[in-house]
Amino acid sequence: MTPLGISIAAALASLALLAIIFELIRRHRLRERYALLWLLAGIVLLVLSLWRSSVNTIAGWAGVRGYPPAVLFAVATLFILVVLLHYSTVVSKLSDQNVILAQRLALLEAKLRDSEG
Amino acid sequence: MAETATEVQPTPLEELKARRRVAIVPALNEEACIGRVVEEIRAFDSGFEIVVVDDGSADRTADVARAHGARVIRLPFNLGIGGAVQTGFRYAWENGFDLAVRVDGDGQHDPAELNAIIQPVLAGEADIAVGSRFAGGAGYRPSRSRRIGIRILAWTVSRLVRQRVTDTTSGFQALNRRGIQLFAADYPHDYPEVEATVMVHRHRLRLREVPVRMRERAGGRSSITALRSVYYMAKVLLALLVGIFRRNVVPLEDR
Protein backbone atom coordinates (compact mmCIF):
# COMPACT_ATOMS: atom_id res chain seq x y z
CA MET A 1 0.00 0.00 0.00
CA THR A 2 1.35 3.42 -0.97
CA PRO A 3 1.60 5.84 2.01
CA LEU A 4 -1.35 8.26 2.06
CA GLY A 5 0.80 11.39 1.80
CA ILE A 6 2.60 10.17 -1.30
CA SER A 7 -0.68 9.05 -2.80
CA ILE A 8 -2.24 12.49 -2.34
CA ALA A 9 0.84 14.26 -3.73
CA ALA A 10 0.88 11.96 -6.76
CA ALA A 11 -2.84 12.50 -7.38
CA LEU A 12 -2.41 16.29 -7.20
CA ALA A 13 0.54 16.13 -9.61
CA SER A 14 -1.49 14.02 -12.06
CA LEU A 15 -4.39 16.47 -11.86
CA ALA A 16 -2.01 19.37 -12.47
CA LEU A 17 -0.63 17.54 -15.53
CA LEU A 18 -4.16 16.98 -16.87
CA ALA A 19 -5.02 20.65 -16.31
CA ILE A 20 -1.89 21.79 -18.17
CA ILE A 21 -2.67 19.48 -21.10
CA PHE A 22 -6.24 20.78 -21.24
CA GLU A 23 -5.08 24.40 -21.20
CA LEU A 24 -2.54 23.75 -23.97
CA ILE A 25 -5.22 22.30 -26.23
CA ARG A 26 -7.57 25.15 -25.43
CA ARG A 27 -4.96 27.67 -26.50
CA HIS A 28 -4.26 25.81 -29.75
CA ARG A 29 -0.74 25.04 -28.55
CA LEU A 30 -1.20 21.27 -28.67
CA ARG A 31 -2.91 19.34 -31.44
CA GLU A 32 -5.52 16.76 -30.51
CA ARG A 33 -3.30 14.06 -31.98
CA TYR A 34 -0.72 14.51 -29.21
CA ALA A 35 -3.26 15.57 -26.65
CA LEU A 36 -4.87 12.11 -26.71
CA LEU A 37 -1.52 10.50 -25.90
CA TRP A 38 -0.80 12.83 -23.01
CA LEU A 39 -4.32 12.70 -21.64
CA LEU A 40 -4.01 8.91 -21.58
CA ALA A 41 -0.70 9.16 -19.71
CA GLY A 42 -2.20 11.61 -17.22
CA ILE A 43 -5.21 9.37 -16.59
CA VAL A 44 -2.99 6.31 -16.03
CA LEU A 45 -0.93 8.28 -13.51
CA LEU A 46 -4.07 9.46 -11.74
CA VAL A 47 -5.45 5.91 -11.49
CA LEU A 48 -2.13 4.60 -10.16
CA SER A 49 -2.04 7.27 -7.46
CA LEU A 50 -5.69 6.91 -6.39
CA TRP A 51 -5.80 3.11 -6.43
CA ARG A 52 -3.28 2.80 -3.66
CA SER A 53 -2.54 -0.91 -3.79
CA SER A 54 -2.15 -0.78 -7.59
CA VAL A 55 1.64 -0.90 -7.74
CA ASN A 56 1.77 -4.02 -5.53
CA THR A 57 -1.12 -5.65 -7.38
CA ILE A 58 0.34 -5.04 -10.83
CA ALA A 59 3.78 -6.19 -9.63
CA GLY A 60 2.05 -9.36 -8.40
CA TRP A 61 0.51 -9.95 -11.87
CA ALA A 62 3.88 -9.41 -13.49
CA GLY A 63 5.51 -11.80 -11.01
CA VAL A 64 7.90 -9.16 -9.67
CA ARG A 65 9.05 -9.89 -6.10
CA GLY A 66 11.21 -7.82 -3.76
CA TYR A 67 10.71 -4.30 -5.11
CA PRO A 68 7.23 -3.69 -6.61
CA PRO A 69 7.86 -0.10 -7.89
CA ALA A 70 10.33 -1.59 -10.39
CA VAL A 71 7.26 -2.39 -12.52
CA LEU A 72 6.36 1.30 -12.54
CA PHE A 73 9.85 2.28 -13.70
CA ALA A 74 9.83 -0.37 -16.41
CA VAL A 75 6.46 0.77 -17.78
CA ALA A 76 7.41 4.46 -17.56
CA THR A 77 10.72 3.86 -19.36
CA LEU A 78 8.98 1.94 -22.11
CA PHE A 79 6.37 4.67 -22.53
CA ILE A 80 9.03 7.38 -22.77
CA LEU A 81 10.98 5.32 -25.31
CA VAL A 82 7.90 4.89 -27.50
CA VAL A 83 7.07 8.61 -27.31
CA LEU A 84 10.66 9.51 -28.23
CA LEU A 85 10.60 7.13 -31.16
CA HIS A 86 7.35 8.69 -32.32
CA TYR A 87 8.88 12.16 -32.08
CA SER A 88 11.83 10.99 -34.16
CA THR A 89 9.46 9.96 -36.93
CA VAL A 90 7.66 13.30 -36.67
CA VAL A 91 10.93 15.25 -36.84
CA SER A 92 12.03 13.19 -39.86
CA LYS A 93 8.80 13.94 -41.66
CA LEU A 94 9.01 17.65 -40.83
CA SER A 95 12.58 17.94 -42.13
CA ASP A 96 11.63 16.12 -45.34
CA GLN A 97 8.77 18.55 -45.85
CA ASN A 98 11.07 21.45 -45.05
CA VAL A 99 13.45 20.37 -47.83
CA ILE A 100 10.56 20.18 -50.29
CA LEU A 101 9.35 23.65 -49.27
CA ALA A 102 12.83 25.18 -49.67
CA GLN A 103 13.23 23.59 -53.11
CA ARG A 104 9.81 24.74 -54.28
CA LEU A 105 10.50 28.26 -53.04
CA ALA A 106 13.90 28.42 -54.77
CA LEU A 107 12.43 27.14 -58.06
CA LEU A 108 9.59 29.63 -57.81
CA GLU A 109 12.00 32.48 -57.12
CA ALA A 110 14.13 31.53 -60.13
CA LYS A 111 11.05 31.37 -62.34
CA LEU A 112 9.85 34.74 -61.09
CA ARG A 113 13.23 36.35 -61.72
CA ASP A 114 13.35 34.90 -65.25
CA SER A 115 9.91 36.21 -66.11
CA GLU A 116 10.82 39.66 -64.79
CA GLY A 117 13.81 39.62 -67.13
CA MET B 1 -38.34 47.50 -45.61
CA ALA B 2 -41.65 47.74 -47.45
CA GLU B 3 -41.80 45.98 -50.77
CA THR B 4 -44.60 46.32 -53.22
CA ALA B 5 -45.87 43.40 -55.22
CA THR B 6 -45.12 45.17 -58.47
CA GLU B 7 -41.42 45.59 -57.67
CA VAL B 8 -39.28 43.40 -59.86
CA GLN B 9 -37.37 40.88 -57.77
CA PRO B 10 -34.17 39.49 -59.20
CA THR B 11 -34.62 35.85 -60.11
CA PRO B 12 -32.35 33.40 -58.31
CA LEU B 13 -30.38 32.99 -61.53
CA GLU B 14 -29.76 36.74 -61.86
CA GLU B 15 -28.89 36.82 -58.20
CA LEU B 16 -26.32 34.10 -58.80
CA LYS B 17 -24.84 35.83 -61.85
CA ALA B 18 -24.22 38.95 -59.77
CA ARG B 19 -21.81 37.10 -57.48
CA ARG B 20 -18.14 36.43 -58.03
CA ARG B 21 -18.22 32.71 -57.46
CA VAL B 22 -15.70 29.95 -57.01
CA ALA B 23 -15.95 26.17 -56.70
CA ILE B 24 -13.34 24.66 -54.41
CA VAL B 25 -12.56 21.04 -55.23
CA PRO B 26 -10.16 19.21 -52.86
CA ALA B 27 -8.70 16.10 -54.51
CA LEU B 28 -6.25 13.38 -53.55
CA ASN B 29 -5.41 10.75 -56.17
CA GLU B 30 -8.65 11.24 -58.10
CA GLU B 31 -7.40 11.13 -61.72
CA ALA B 32 -10.30 8.83 -62.59
CA CYS B 33 -13.04 11.19 -61.31
CA ILE B 34 -11.68 14.70 -61.30
CA GLY B 35 -12.34 15.43 -64.99
CA ARG B 36 -15.99 14.52 -64.68
CA VAL B 37 -16.40 16.58 -61.48
CA VAL B 38 -14.93 19.66 -63.19
CA GLU B 39 -17.15 19.21 -66.27
CA GLU B 40 -20.27 18.74 -64.13
CA ILE B 41 -19.60 21.92 -62.16
CA ARG B 42 -19.18 23.83 -65.41
CA ALA B 43 -22.37 22.26 -66.74
CA PHE B 44 -24.23 23.49 -63.65
CA ASP B 45 -22.96 27.05 -64.08
CA SER B 46 -20.10 28.10 -66.33
CA GLY B 47 -19.62 31.26 -64.28
CA PHE B 48 -17.86 29.39 -61.49
CA GLU B 49 -14.11 29.62 -61.35
CA ILE B 50 -13.17 26.01 -60.62
CA VAL B 51 -10.19 25.60 -58.31
CA VAL B 52 -8.89 22.09 -57.77
CA VAL B 53 -6.68 21.81 -54.71
CA ASP B 54 -4.42 18.82 -55.31
CA ASP B 55 -3.39 17.59 -51.87
CA GLY B 56 -0.11 15.99 -52.90
CA SER B 57 -1.50 13.37 -55.29
CA ALA B 58 0.86 10.71 -56.63
CA ASP B 59 -1.20 10.25 -59.79
CA ARG B 60 -2.14 12.61 -62.64
CA THR B 61 -4.95 14.41 -60.80
CA ALA B 62 -3.44 17.87 -61.40
CA ASP B 63 -2.81 17.25 -65.13
CA VAL B 64 -6.29 15.88 -65.72
CA ALA B 65 -7.92 18.78 -63.86
CA ARG B 66 -5.86 21.30 -65.83
CA ALA B 67 -6.75 19.58 -69.10
CA HIS B 68 -10.42 20.05 -68.23
CA GLY B 69 -9.85 23.75 -67.73
CA ALA B 70 -9.70 23.99 -63.93
CA ARG B 71 -7.26 26.20 -62.08
CA VAL B 72 -5.05 23.84 -60.10
CA ILE B 73 -3.35 24.62 -56.81
CA ARG B 74 -0.85 21.86 -56.12
CA LEU B 75 0.22 21.47 -52.53
CA PRO B 76 3.89 20.45 -52.19
CA PHE B 77 2.93 17.57 -49.90
CA ASN B 78 -0.15 16.05 -48.35
CA LEU B 79 -1.70 18.40 -45.81
CA GLY B 80 -4.82 16.39 -45.08
CA ILE B 81 -8.34 17.37 -46.03
CA GLY B 82 -8.55 20.33 -43.61
CA GLY B 83 -5.36 21.95 -44.89
CA ALA B 84 -6.35 21.35 -48.51
CA VAL B 85 -9.82 22.82 -48.17
CA GLN B 86 -8.52 25.83 -46.25
CA THR B 87 -6.11 26.53 -49.11
CA GLY B 88 -9.19 26.88 -51.31
CA PHE B 89 -10.89 29.23 -48.86
CA ARG B 90 -7.72 31.36 -48.62
CA TYR B 91 -7.69 31.59 -52.42
CA ALA B 92 -11.36 32.59 -52.42
CA TRP B 93 -10.82 35.22 -49.73
CA GLU B 94 -7.70 36.77 -51.25
CA ASN B 95 -9.25 36.97 -54.70
CA GLY B 96 -12.41 38.66 -53.56
CA PHE B 97 -14.94 35.93 -54.25
CA ASP B 98 -18.26 36.41 -52.50
CA LEU B 99 -19.76 32.99 -53.06
CA ALA B 100 -17.86 29.74 -52.64
CA VAL B 101 -19.05 26.18 -52.98
CA ARG B 102 -17.08 23.13 -51.99
CA VAL B 103 -17.44 19.98 -54.07
CA ASP B 104 -15.28 16.97 -53.25
CA GLY B 105 -13.09 15.62 -56.03
CA ASP B 106 -14.13 12.00 -55.60
CA GLY B 107 -17.45 12.39 -57.39
CA GLN B 108 -19.59 11.84 -54.28
CA HIS B 109 -21.12 15.30 -54.58
CA ASP B 110 -23.40 15.75 -57.56
CA PRO B 111 -22.98 19.34 -58.81
CA ALA B 112 -26.60 19.22 -60.02
CA GLU B 113 -27.58 19.48 -56.32
CA LEU B 114 -25.65 22.74 -55.97
CA ASN B 115 -28.76 24.71 -56.85
CA ALA B 116 -30.48 23.66 -53.62
CA ILE B 117 -27.37 24.28 -51.50
CA ILE B 118 -26.73 27.75 -52.92
CA GLN B 119 -30.30 29.01 -52.43
CA PRO B 120 -30.20 29.84 -48.67
CA VAL B 121 -26.90 31.70 -49.15
CA LEU B 122 -28.15 33.65 -52.19
CA ALA B 123 -31.34 34.53 -50.35
CA GLY B 124 -29.28 35.88 -47.45
CA GLU B 125 -30.85 33.36 -45.06
CA ALA B 126 -27.59 31.60 -44.21
CA ASP B 127 -23.87 32.35 -44.20
CA ILE B 128 -23.13 28.71 -44.80
CA ALA B 129 -25.38 26.02 -46.24
CA VAL B 130 -24.52 22.35 -45.93
CA GLY B 131 -25.87 19.51 -48.04
CA SER B 132 -27.10 16.77 -45.70
CA ARG B 133 -27.65 13.14 -46.65
CA PHE B 134 -30.04 12.66 -43.74
CA ALA B 135 -32.17 15.81 -43.61
CA GLY B 136 -35.09 14.32 -45.51
CA GLY B 137 -33.90 13.00 -48.86
CA ALA B 138 -33.77 9.20 -48.68
CA GLY B 139 -31.30 7.00 -50.47
CA TYR B 140 -28.22 6.85 -48.30
CA ARG B 141 -27.87 3.86 -45.94
CA PRO B 142 -24.46 3.74 -44.26
CA SER B 143 -23.14 0.64 -42.51
CA ARG B 144 -24.25 -0.01 -38.92
CA SER B 145 -21.02 1.06 -37.23
CA ARG B 146 -20.80 4.18 -39.34
CA ARG B 147 -24.42 5.00 -38.57
CA ILE B 148 -23.70 4.86 -34.82
CA GLY B 149 -20.72 7.17 -35.26
CA ILE B 150 -22.77 9.59 -37.34
CA ARG B 151 -25.54 9.57 -34.70
CA ILE B 152 -23.14 10.31 -31.83
CA LEU B 153 -21.55 13.20 -33.70
CA ALA B 154 -24.90 14.58 -34.87
CA TRP B 155 -26.32 14.43 -31.35
CA THR B 156 -23.26 16.08 -29.76
CA VAL B 157 -22.98 18.82 -32.36
CA SER B 158 -26.72 19.54 -32.30
CA ARG B 159 -26.53 20.12 -28.52
CA LEU B 160 -23.49 22.37 -28.88
CA VAL B 161 -24.93 24.58 -31.61
CA ARG B 162 -28.50 24.47 -30.27
CA GLN B 163 -29.84 23.62 -33.70
CA ARG B 164 -30.63 20.27 -35.27
CA VAL B 165 -27.73 19.12 -37.41
CA THR B 166 -28.03 15.74 -39.11
CA ASP B 167 -24.93 15.40 -41.27
CA THR B 168 -21.88 16.70 -39.43
CA THR B 169 -19.29 15.31 -41.83
CA SER B 170 -20.70 16.68 -45.07
CA GLY B 171 -18.25 18.71 -47.12
CA PHE B 172 -20.88 19.66 -49.73
CA GLN B 173 -21.26 23.33 -48.82
CA ALA B 174 -21.92 26.86 -50.02
CA LEU B 175 -20.63 29.97 -48.23
CA ASN B 176 -20.95 33.71 -48.51
CA ARG B 177 -18.07 36.15 -47.99
CA ARG B 178 -18.34 35.98 -44.19
CA GLY B 179 -18.17 32.20 -44.24
CA ILE B 180 -15.17 32.31 -46.58
CA GLN B 181 -13.48 34.79 -44.26
CA LEU B 182 -13.96 32.59 -41.21
CA PHE B 183 -12.68 29.41 -42.85
CA ALA B 184 -9.76 31.21 -44.51
CA ALA B 185 -8.68 32.46 -41.09
CA ASP B 186 -9.21 29.28 -39.09
CA TYR B 187 -10.06 25.75 -40.14
CA PRO B 188 -9.68 22.46 -38.25
CA HIS B 189 -7.46 19.59 -39.42
CA ASP B 190 -8.91 16.12 -39.88
CA TYR B 191 -12.64 15.50 -40.04
CA PRO B 192 -12.79 19.31 -40.15
CA GLU B 193 -16.51 19.67 -40.88
CA VAL B 194 -17.58 18.58 -37.39
CA GLU B 195 -15.49 21.16 -35.56
CA ALA B 196 -16.15 23.74 -38.26
CA THR B 197 -19.90 23.48 -37.59
CA VAL B 198 -19.31 24.41 -33.95
CA MET B 199 -16.93 27.19 -34.99
CA VAL B 200 -19.58 28.66 -37.29
CA HIS B 201 -22.02 28.74 -34.40
CA ARG B 202 -19.54 30.38 -32.03
CA HIS B 203 -18.89 33.16 -34.54
CA ARG B 204 -22.64 33.70 -34.75
CA LEU B 205 -22.78 32.82 -38.42
CA ARG B 206 -26.01 31.30 -39.63
CA LEU B 207 -25.90 27.68 -40.71
CA ARG B 208 -28.58 25.93 -42.74
CA GLU B 209 -28.82 22.28 -43.72
CA VAL B 210 -30.26 21.37 -47.08
CA PRO B 211 -31.34 17.81 -47.96
CA VAL B 212 -29.32 16.41 -50.85
CA ARG B 213 -28.57 13.08 -52.41
CA MET B 214 -24.99 11.95 -52.59
CA ARG B 215 -23.56 9.38 -54.94
CA GLU B 216 -21.49 6.33 -54.24
CA ARG B 217 -17.85 6.91 -54.94
CA ALA B 218 -17.19 6.61 -58.66
CA GLY B 219 -13.54 5.61 -58.26
CA GLY B 220 -10.56 5.89 -55.94
CA ARG B 221 -11.05 4.91 -52.32
CA SER B 222 -12.20 6.67 -49.19
CA SER B 223 -9.43 7.92 -46.96
CA ILE B 224 -11.35 6.72 -43.90
CA THR B 225 -10.80 3.15 -42.71
CA ALA B 226 -12.61 1.35 -39.88
CA LEU B 227 -9.88 1.43 -37.23
CA ARG B 228 -9.05 5.01 -38.00
CA SER B 229 -12.60 6.15 -37.56
CA VAL B 230 -12.56 5.12 -33.88
CA TYR B 231 -9.38 7.15 -33.39
CA TYR B 232 -10.84 10.11 -35.29
CA MET B 233 -14.00 9.86 -33.26
CA ALA B 234 -12.06 10.17 -29.99
CA LYS B 235 -10.08 13.05 -31.40
CA VAL B 236 -13.08 14.95 -32.70
CA LEU B 237 -15.03 14.48 -29.45
CA LEU B 238 -12.00 15.74 -27.52
CA ALA B 239 -11.74 18.74 -29.83
CA LEU B 240 -15.45 19.48 -29.36
CA LEU B 241 -15.16 19.15 -25.59
CA VAL B 242 -12.20 21.50 -25.41
CA GLY B 243 -13.91 23.82 -27.88
CA ILE B 244 -16.65 24.49 -25.33
CA PHE B 245 -14.08 26.10 -23.07
CA ARG B 246 -12.61 28.34 -25.76
CA ARG B 247 -13.89 31.83 -25.27
CA ASN B 248 -11.57 33.85 -27.46
CA VAL B 249 -12.68 33.25 -30.99
CA VAL B 250 -10.78 34.86 -33.85
CA PRO B 251 -11.98 38.48 -33.95
CA LEU B 252 -13.04 38.56 -37.57
CA GLU B 253 -14.27 42.13 -37.58
CA ASP B 254 -10.75 43.41 -36.91
CA ARG B 255 -9.19 41.72 -39.87
Image (spheres, coloured by chain):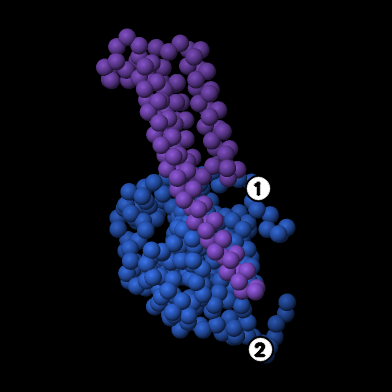
Question: Which residue is most to the top?
Answer: A66
Q: Quadrant of residue B11?
A: bottom right
- Answer left or right for A62 relative to B229: left
Q: Mark 2 points at which residue?
A: B8
Q: Colour of chain B?
A: blue
Inspect the image, locate mark 1, and give the three-letter code of the amino acid beneath it: Asn
Residue under disc 1 on the same chain as residue under disc 2: yes
Q: Is residue B108 visible?
A: no
Relative depth, front residue between A55 and B129: A55
Q: In which quarter of the image is the C terminus of chain B?
A: bottom right
Question: Percent position (x, y) of residue A107?
Answer: 54, 64
- The chain letter under disc 1 is B
Inspect the image, locate mark 2, and give the three-letter code of the amino acid beneath it: Val
Going 58% across and 69% down the picture, which residue do you hit? A111
Identify whether B141 is placed above or below A51.
Answer: below
Helix, strand or loop under label 1: loop
Going 44% across and 26% down the picture, which residue do you hit? A45
- The chain letter under disc 2 is B
Relative depth, front residue between B29 and A11: B29
Disc 1/disc 2 C-alpha distance (Å): 44 Å
Identify whether B67 is placed above or below B132.
Answer: below
Marker disc for residue B248: 1
Q: Quadrant of the N terminus of chain B?
A: bottom right
Helix, strand or loop under label 2: loop
Which chain is depicted purple?
A
Relative depth, front residue between B105 and B15: B105
Question: Percent position (x, y) of residue A98?
Answer: 52, 52
Question: Percent position (x, y) of residue A62?
Answer: 28, 20
Going 65% across and 73% down the picture, which residue do you hit? A116
Identify whether B103 is placed above or below B250.
Answer: below
N-terminal of the pair, mark 1 or mark 2, is: 2
Label 1 environment density (alpha carbons within 10 Å; few <14, some 14–19, many ≥20) = few
